[in-house]
Image (spheres, rainbow, N blue to C red):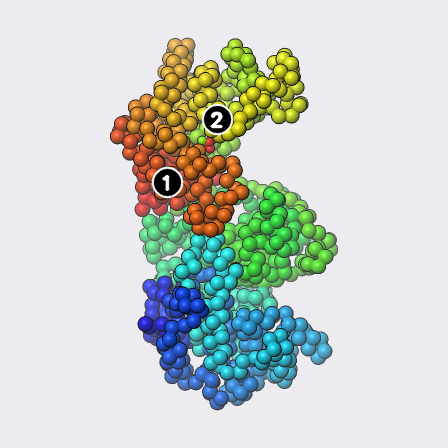
Amino acid sequence: TKWVYTFGDGTAEGEAGMRNLLGGKGANLAEMSNLGLPVPPGFTITTEVCTYYYDHERSYPGDLAAQVEEALAHVGRLTGKTFGDARNPLLVSVRSGARASMPGMMDTVLNLGLNDVTVAAVAAAAGDARFAWDSYRRFITMYSDVVLGVEHHHFEEALEDYKARKGYDLDTDLLAEDWQVLVARYKEIVAKELGKPFPQDPKEQLWGAIGAVFGSWMNNRAIKYRELHAIPASWGTAVNVQAMVFGNRGETSATGVAFTRNPSTGEKELYGEFLINAQGEDVVAGIRTPQDITEKARLAAGSDRPSMEQAMPAAYAELVRIYELLERHYRDMQDLEFTVEEGKLWMLQTRSGKRTAKAALKIAVDLASEGLISREEAITRIDPLALDQLLHPTIDPKAERRVIASGLPASPGAACGEIVFSSEDAEEAKKAGRKVILVRVETSPEDIHGMHAAEGILTTRGGMTSHAAVVARGMGKPCVSGAGSVRVDYRNGVMLAAGQTFSKGDVVTIDGSTGQVLAGEVKMLEPELSGEFATLMSWADGVRRMKVRANAETPLDAKTARNFGAEGIGLCRTEHMFFDGDRIVAVREMILADDEAGRRAALAKLLPMQRADFVELFTIMQGLPVTIRLLDPPLHEFLPHTDAEIAEVAASLKVDEDKLRRRASELSEFNPMLGFRGCRLAVRYPEIAEMQARAIFEAAVEAGKRTGEPVAVEVMVPLVMTRAELDLVKGRIDAMAAAVKAETGVAVPYQVGTMIELPRAALRAGEIAETAAFFSFGTNDLTQTTLGISRDDAASFLVTYTAGGILPADPFVTLDQEGVGELVKLAAERGRAARSDLKLGICGEHGGDPDSIRFCEGAGLDYVSCSPYRVPIARLAAAQAAL
Ligand code: PEP
Ligand code: MG
């Protein structure tokens, strides 16, 4: 088997399409090589070696060592150097590279191959002893940390001690001799910590680093990341070994990262940071503050430190040439890593760049306009769920801003919450239902879980490409990074900003779009949905087949839904209208009444309120279809609980409190979800359905007069299990429609349909469709009743199922396509066979879930209905499903 693929000098054994075998980084290094770009030569050990390694008790294929030897020799020939040679040593970097970019794994070891002998040769060849010893100490630190497990702080402390003793301020103050002393000290530290010396044999170093990459595939952080992003463990990682080029060889050398377009806004401009006389990890770690790449960016930032464009015009011009070429080649925004060694530019990585949702939209629309991709491709480029980022509030520009610090606008959007200083605290607070801002000096992959739990992230160190910034953008969380004036004191759990002390639990607001940090909670604004958002959504609307409706009952929800492009209301849960103000008292009177007369009296109070609600809803929806569901929930949800509530109802009903308490306890149920609810209410107490039907039809008459548009009413009967139930309730509704017509002289066009939320209803869909004009799949209940898992009690055990892979996903979030989905398909088929124009929709939570929406497209549903904020997500997902 071929385990090793070389690249460099304008050719490569691999190419971009071999991502599965070579990992993302390896495949793209090969591709860049093939494109003739300046890539330091190297080789990729395939992901199959990783798989082999774990299938064979962490051992390598027998012929791997020979293939690595050969590849090393090849790299040696291209560079004119020899790995391990005392006079002309080849130094290499070792990097991981999975199929999907995967933080959490061992990332990089640089300068590998240095030891007490080769360091002298490197010094002599470069004519620069300081550079050689600086590189050596970097190597020892990195290698010890990521391969040998000797923590970074040991070396940091030794360095700080040394600087203090010598009276040095900056690392750049240290001379060759200083680094030489420190190297000796570092080696002592390693020997003390490990009980054996730092490995001097370059081969041993290399295999140590390779083993560390493969080993890190199974470390907790990587496992956790794969879990969060549904990456199978079987994929494995590749290892990239590449000849070193040095960004730390003085003022004509540099290292940098760049995006071919702005990853926050999507603006078409080269965007990035670089550091003169530095190695790659300096930029990412946020140890030194980087400089701008373009003059434009430098001027915008008002920085007096030169841009790359100024300081290294030739290398800059080459970077521009290459980035334009790469963007055209990959037809997407790229994230680049490069090094300038004594004026010459080298490319170390290219990949599709992470971006905010806002940037993703702009880039997709721009690329389509530039003719690089089609509109259909633009539609598929956007993750529907990521749109969520755009639909959330930003800080009201008119709000008072008590700015306590400013940092970089690392990830847009605003967030507000209590300060916490650790990821553990963030997670704990989240569990307790509190909102927090995670405040750190800088973040590392260990903080991923805390960043997930937090509303936003604030760091005091690091640039736009620091860990915090990159990860937050990926997560769509607001982030302010590098707020240097903030002092964080972890030990005492406080931070100092603008002369004030803020403790854990104090509320702050961060504005990831401006970089501001504000004291307290600040007023936020609803998002703007114009520009690229509107453009892309209109493209999506042009290709989708399914309609998108919203689940809404309040006027605000209905308006929001319309703003987001809802094409009707797919579910109005009337019971939500029963809790407002005095209504709940009337509802309780109705439930607790002894007889029909009592119920009718209470219902008469509800009628005008219910009618007024519907008039408003119909008016807002202006002729779009509105599905109103008759009362559905278990009655117990409305029962009075406290003594005060019972006293209130008793007074209103003029009955004895004790009697009322007895009646309430009679009505309590063991299994309310399988109890007296749904159409069973209408079957047992037809007067409830009658009141609701009257309110609906009278409201339709009135709203029709107001708007001049006929109201498209759909009356929906919940939780039907037999056709007979539906026939009975439909009879009452039809009678009421006739009555209202007789009274008003207006015939309201309407349909009566049902929800399919019980397996029996799905199975008997054929006969139910003879009565029902439409089906709306209530997949919340259908999931609950098909899986036999209570939707209200699932939390305590469901995680065990999803984490353990017993269920692929939470079935209440993503439709169980094999089980519940089969019932949906079967009901759709049987229903359509009985009534060819049967309208089919879904209104469970799944109606807003992209995977489930794809399923609905396949099942031939006519529409999905979801919560208002999900409407744009559903529009895009429906378009993608149709493509
Ligand atoms: C459902 O069951 O899927 C549904 C939409 O109804 P509810 O969530 O109100 O029970
Ligand atoms: Mg339901």
**In terms of image quarters, where does ligand 1 lie?**
top left
Q: Is residue 604 above or below residue 205?
A: above
- Circle 2 SS class: loop
In the picture, the disc for residue 40 is none
Name the residue: 40% across, 60% down: 234
Instruction: Measure how far apart labels 1 and 2 are at the Cα level.
Output: 24 Å
**Image disc number at residue 819:** 1
- Inspect the image, locate mark 1, and give the three-letter code of the amino acid beneath it: Gly
Which residue is at the front of the view, 26 or 379?
26
Q: Residue at x 43, y 65 (%)?
A: 54
Q: Quadrant of the N terminus?
A: bottom left
Viewer-side residue, 490 vs 233: 233
Q: Position of residue 875 (x, y in %)?
A: 39, 41
Q: Looking at the image, which residue is at 50% across and 23% down?
A: 613
Q: Is residue 721 left or right of residue 467?
A: left
Q: Secondary structure at mark 1?
A: loop
- Checking the image for residue 675, the label placed there is 2
